[in-house]
């Protein structure tokens, strides 16, 4: 407990945040980096409306539809693992620039794909980029943010993801309305992705490297120069001293990366906690709605065109709730967010299952009731769970294992996502909406118990103070 008290005190002795040009510069850095999240969201959401015309043109079967959808997700798992490791050695900024190139190349391959094989190659390239962005961008934002606003700043990436998904839903509906009769309309839907990829590439060329990564590589003067652009002079010098102290202690211990994880039970435990949180987020079934929302709404009773338009509603609530979540991130503890989110999600699942069972197919009210409950479900996840999980993963690991830690956690997250995206259509076909959402509810009860009993708090501490508490196990002694 003494270690935890020291950590909190060390955070409070930092000079306070002040306004000025450095705050505007910090906002610009965050804005440019979150184009990676925007691409993440658009590329995962565009399949929602593009799948049916794509299937008609290429003659896809239910199995190959699942393959096209899940190939991106499984590749994202590998991209998360590689991206985290690459950013540790090569740098956060350079890795994000490489991801922008991958986003563009993948988009080009999908848009020009003459057959299923090339289409899947393009989806794999996009998946590698999405997975890399899902690990590197949150870490970059967390490492450049002051601890007081780390939650809202790092959380902007998740907001950008849902904005990207909403943009995909709207673009799909507009393009389908204007060019639905044109063969290859789905290619136009995918082509839009090239625009933010270009913006990310050129934007990151002018952005700084993570100061914490620079310190770890012994580049102190460069780190101080970066901090001076996004902090007041006094605050920049004080933060640099904290980061240097922790980096020196790591070097003295000679326990870095994999070696440290397997030689320290506290580091292994926090890795397992992070993996569990990532799985819990995916097992809410949120991406089943984001990928197959049109399918779920058709199953509930909407026509295909009606479902495509109605599908915009979950996208809108995701953005609204995500915006509200940013306001809450620096005001409500992470644990409370997880507990509220999982509890509300479980209730939403039960209500969707009950409604689909109580209202028979053909009842004119059925599709609108289920749509309203899906909106409640998506809003609950986005308001309390999604942003909080991504922020947590970006901040909880010590510097020497941050890339590895978030890489492994997000790898498992994406594998879980992949299996859900591959088998969700078959699950709905086998047990319907009722059985599917009752199953999600049961899984979420287990996740809720896990969050209550195993997840420690991280809000309100510097990354360096968190590193000390995680390494010693003191973080588990503090309950808010």
Image (cartoon, rainbow, N blue to C red):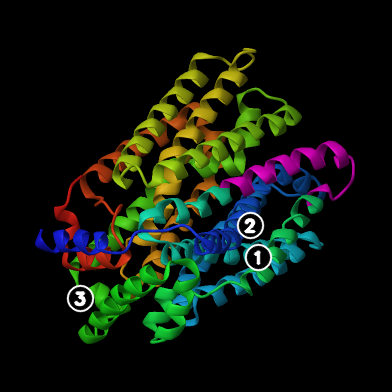
Secondary structure predominantly adopted by residues drawn in magenta: helix
SS at badge 2: helix
Q: Where, by quadrant of the figure, is residue 248 drawn?
A: bottom left
Indicate whether residue 183 is drawn in magenta: yes
What label sits on residue 263 in the rendered view? 3
Quadrant into which the N terminus falls: bottom left
Question: How far across and how far down the image is residue 339, in percent?
Answer: 31, 38
- Compared to residue 321, the image places residue 11 above or below, namely below
The answer for how far apart the CA atoms under marks 2 and 3 are is 38 Å
Question: How far across and how far down the image is residue 468, in percent?
Answer: 22, 68
Q: Nearer the viewer, mark 1 or mark 3?
A: 1
Tell me the crowding category of disc 1: few under 14, some 14 to 19, or many 20 or more residues within 10 angstroms, Cα based. many
Q: Where, by quadrant of the figure, is residue 172 drawn?
A: top right
Quadrant into which the C terminus falls: top left
Q: Mark 1 sits on what residue?
A: 200
What label sits on residue 64 in the rendered view? none
Label 2 close to label 3 by CB (< 8 Å): no
Q: Earlier in the sequence, mark 1 or mark 2?
A: 2
In depth, the one of 362 and 171 nearer the eye is 171
Tell me the crowding category of disc 2: few under 14, some 14 to 19, or many 20 or more residues within 10 angstroms, Cα based. many
**Residue in the image at 23% along x and 81% along y:** 249
- Compared to residue 436, the image places residue 370 above or below, namely above
The answer for how far apart the CA atoms under marks 1 and 2 are is 9 Å
Q: Earlier in the sequence, mark 1 or mark 3?
A: 1
Question: How far across and how far down the image is residue 284, in percent?
Answer: 43, 40
**Residue in the image at 50% along x and 31% along y:** 431
Q: Mark 2 sits on what residue?
A: 39
The stretch of residues the image draws in magenta is 162-186
The answer for how far apart the CA atoms under marks 1 and 3 are is 39 Å
């Amino acid at each position: 407990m003494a270690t935890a008290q020291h950590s909190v005190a060390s955070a409070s002795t930092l000079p306070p945040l002040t306004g000025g040009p450095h705050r505007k510069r910090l906002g610009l850095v965050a804005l440019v980096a979150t184009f990676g999240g925007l691409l993440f969201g658009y590329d995962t959401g565009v399949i929602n409306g593009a799948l049916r015309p794509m299937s008609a043109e290429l003659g896809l079967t239910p199995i190959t539809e699942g393959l096209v959808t899940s190939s991106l997700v499984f590749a994202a798992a590998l991209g998360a693992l590689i991206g985290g490791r690459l950013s540790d050695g090569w740098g956060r900024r350079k890795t994000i620039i490489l991801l922008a190139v991958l986003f563009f190349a993948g988009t080009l391959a999908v848009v020009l794909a003459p057959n299923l094989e090339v289409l899947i190659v393009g989806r794999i390239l996009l998946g590698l980029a999405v997975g890399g962005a899902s690990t590197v961008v949150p870490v970059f934002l967390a490492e450049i943010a002051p601890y007081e606003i780390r939650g809202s700043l790092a959380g902007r990436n998740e907001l950008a993801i849902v904005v990207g998904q909403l943009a995909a839903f709207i673009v799909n509906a507009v393009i389908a309305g204007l060019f639905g009769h044109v063969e290859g309309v789905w290619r136009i839907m995918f082509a839009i992705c090239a625009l933010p990829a270009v913006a990310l590439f050129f934007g990151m060329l002018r952005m700084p490297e993570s100061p914490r990564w620079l310190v770890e590589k012994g580049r102190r003067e460069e780190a101080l120069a970066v901090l001076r652009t996004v902090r007041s002079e006094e605050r920049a010098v004080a933060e640099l001293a904290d980061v240097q102290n922790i980096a020196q202690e790591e070097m003295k211990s000679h326990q870095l990366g994999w070696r440290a994880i397997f030689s320290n039970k506290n580091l292994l435990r926090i890795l397992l906690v992070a993996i569990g949180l990532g799985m819990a987020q995916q097992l809410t079934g949120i991406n089943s709605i984001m990928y197959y929302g049109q399918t779920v709404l058709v199953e509930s009773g909407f026509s295909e065109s009606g479902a495509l338009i109605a599908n915009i509603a979950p996208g809108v609530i995701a953005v609204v709730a995500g915006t509200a979540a940013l306001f809450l991130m620096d005001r409500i503890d992470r644990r409370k967010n997880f507990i509220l989110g999982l509890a509300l999600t479980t209730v939403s699942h039960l209500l969707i299952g009950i409604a689909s069972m109580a209202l028979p197919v053909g009842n004119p009210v059925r599709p609108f009731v289920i749509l309203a409950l899906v909106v409640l479900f998506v809003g609950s996840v986005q308001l309390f769970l999604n942003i909080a999980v991504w922020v947590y993963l970006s901040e909880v690991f010590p510097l020497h294992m941050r890339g590895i830690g978030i890489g492994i956690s997000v790898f498992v997250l994406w594998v879980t996502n992949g299996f859900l995206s591959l088998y969700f259509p078959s699950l709905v076909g086998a047990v319907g909406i009722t059985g599917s959402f009752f199953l999600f509810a049961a899984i979420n009860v287990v996740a809720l118990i896990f969050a209550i009993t195993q997840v420690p708090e991280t809000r309100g501490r510097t990354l360096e103070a968190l590193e000390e508490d995680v390494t010693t196990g003191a973080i588990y002694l503090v309950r808010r």
